Amino acid sequence: MTTTDPDTGPRTEPTGEGAGIESGAEARGPVRLFGIRHHGPGSARALATALAELRPDIVLIEGPPEADKIVELAGDEEMVPPVALLAYAVDDSTRAAFWPFAVFSPEWQAIRYALAAGVPVRFCDLPAAQQFASSGSAGRRGLSIDPLATLAEAGGYDDPERWWDDVIEHRRDGAEPFTVIAEAMGELRIGEEATGREAQREAYMRTVIRKALKEGFERIAVVCGAWHVPALELPLPPATHDARILKGLPKRKVACTWVPWTHGRLATASGYGAGVTSPGWYHHLFTAPDQITTRWLSKVARVLRAEDLPVSSAHVIEAVRLAETLAALRERPLAGLSEVTEATRAVMCGGNDVLLDLVTREAVVGELLGAVPAATPQAPVAADLAAQARRLRLKRDAVERVVELDLRKPNDLEKSRLLHRLRILGIDWGVPTADERRNQGTFRETWTLSWDPGLEVDLVAAGAHGTTVLGAATTTMLRVADESSTLAAVTAALERSLLADLADALPALLAGVDTRAAKDADVGHLMAALPALARSARYGDVRGSDTGGLGSVASRMVSRVCAGLARTVHGLDPEAAAKVLELIDGVQDATALLPAEVRGEWLATLEGLSDRPSVPPLIAGRLTRLMLDTSRLESREVGLRLGRVLTPGTPTGDAAGYIEGFLAGGGLLLIHDEHLLALVDSWLAGIRDDDFVEVLPLLRRTFGTFAPPERRSIGSRASRLGPAGRIRVVAEDNELDEELAATVLPAVARLLGV
């Protein structure tokens, strides 16, 4: 997903150009300019007070004018910030931008004031239609100074953010700050002339102000970034001046809607250009009625107690005292985030930065998710998803949570299908757990769910493929069937379509698999595609999907693999042999899911290759083990093969490769078959020192795959083996070892009471 940066509003004001320092006001005639910072509790509180005193008859706010049609939804009881305006180009939905608002955003307070007072509220920034059409052509405007840093330095601060917090955000009463900040912006903009996109934006803002004056409004409140205030002061330049700047700007058709947002997405760490470092802290500053420090540290204590950490009331009291003492020593009007953080680390976390990171994540940033009314206009796919989520009781939550689904339950099966369809569309609301691939096709699925507001753009983009989640996912898979040139890609798409129950896409995908398999002469490609196809064949039983035709396609693919496998394994070097061995193991597992006759054909092919001299030792050892596990070779024959391989005449490297292939997958065989253990032990004891150094890494890799209990048992049994010459080789499987049997007679006698 690509998101167009519109160079406007809360989305794009860059630090140093206004995002960090927007405040100030100027009152001349009918227009009152309120320069603000986009997300600041002090600015929001001061603006709400100023608007109540001014009682404007219209409010103009920096933002996309396309949102004028839906701004009234902000007054709905179901609208809960944080939320964002989403604008996107109708003909290219990947070109989109967000304008986020929290409850502590001054623009949000201005919107709510206007709606409550019954006065018009409009957005006055350069339309998104023009910004999307000309993005990149106008250029970005650079400043020769950082306004926030300059003002902070003049105030005796070395930290601009801390200066802004002390001067604006921590203010709870007193004189309004807009006038003095506007004067400061005016001084800083001397010699600074807007160009490019900034010039276009300010020209359009002036155009909207002129229109409001012409309509007869007498008290016009303009809420904008403080950096823009000097450019919007009366008297305005001639209209022709701005018309020249805006002349010829291209346009695109744009749609606009409201979407839920999160505090995490408001944070600077998310990459948001106008973000703040501590949304959770700012939310607290705006909403706490009194005793800000005490209430905050009490919240921190609840976060730590939720993790079963022993935090008492005494800890809270001591932390409050420390934070307030630090604020007094630093001559701050209120204990700020740095003071309460230091107090939290010292008193509540015992200096543990890991616990402090928890507090930062859960409280300082937070993951509060907003909500929008059901009447909010949505893109078709987004509306379909919202309806399905309500029906299936799938709640969108920014906090990560794990959900287990039982596919035998209709509701859980529908949830699974929905999540799989969304993943096909690139919308990862849910992600299968790490071990889910090994459990595909069973009756249970485990998902990790976490809703990211950025997925709203993906939902809009999915509208290019259909009007519903099902339709868009089906179209996407049909496109893979038509356009993909590789067998593996089409087979993977077939498997995903079965998981998502895309019945209309299955015939085309199945035909695509069959056609590409018939044309593909590379046995390796066929082997790589078979596991997904075989897994798909069993989904009919588990998920109620129609898998007709899969078995016959898989059978034909297995036959082609069997016909060409001898050529594939002939004369491979060790590295290539290891890759082919992975493919063989994959087909071995896949054929276990296919009809018995298909499995039999595959095993017969392996049996014929297992003792060929041209087969690399690694693969030959693995094939011999598979024949033993499937009862196609007797233990005695396997012992003879191992005996031949482990004789001094066989190169040590070849013998080690054979052992690696034979023992791959577990060491239980050596625990239960003392004869094979003795053969391996005798061979190891006879390796020359120089050769042992050469094969040691391979042996460590082989035995390192065994579980620790297996390794201990093998070592214990090997320690009891006598010299190689004393190992008694059983001639016949049914011959009684009288000496061994005699050792258990006393125990049997006691059990029988003899």
Image (spheres, rainbow, N blue to C red):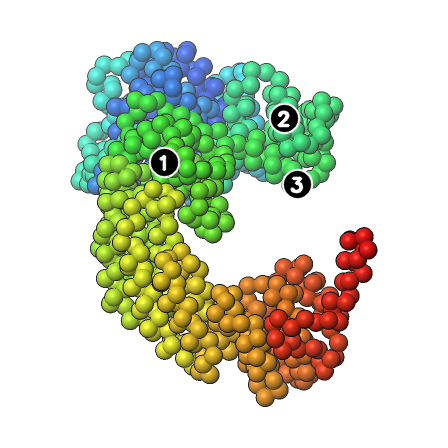
Viewer-nearest residue: 298 or 627 = 627
Neighbor class of circle 2 (other Cα within 10 Å; few <14, some 14-19, many 20+) is some
Kindly indicate the quadrant of the structure image that contains residue 68: top left
Neighbor class of circle 1 (other Cα within 10 Å; few <14, some 14-19, many 20+) is some
Q: Residue at x 65, y 76 (%)?
A: 730
Secondary structure found at label 1: helix
Query: Do the residues under discs 1 and 3 have CB atoms within 8 angstroms?
Result: no
Q: Which residue is mark 3?
A: 353
Query: Do the residues under discs 1 and 2 have CB atoms within 8 angstroms?
Result: no
Q: Label 2 is placed on what type of residue?
A: Arg
Q: Label 3 is placed on what type of residue?
A: Asp
Q: Label 1 is placed on what type of residue?
A: Glu
Kindly indicate the quadrant of the structure image that contains residue 203: top left
Kindly indicate the quadrant of the structure image that contains residue 74: top left
Q: Which residue is mark 2?
A: 302
473 left or right of 429 in image: left
Q: Is residue 613 above or below residue 455?
A: below
Viewer-nearest residue: 566 or 471 = 566
Q: Position of residue 536 (x, y in %)?
A: 35, 52
Q: Earlier in the sequence, mark 2 or mark 3?
A: 2
Q: Residue at x 70, y 28 (%)?
A: 311
Q: Quadrant of the C terminus?
A: bottom right
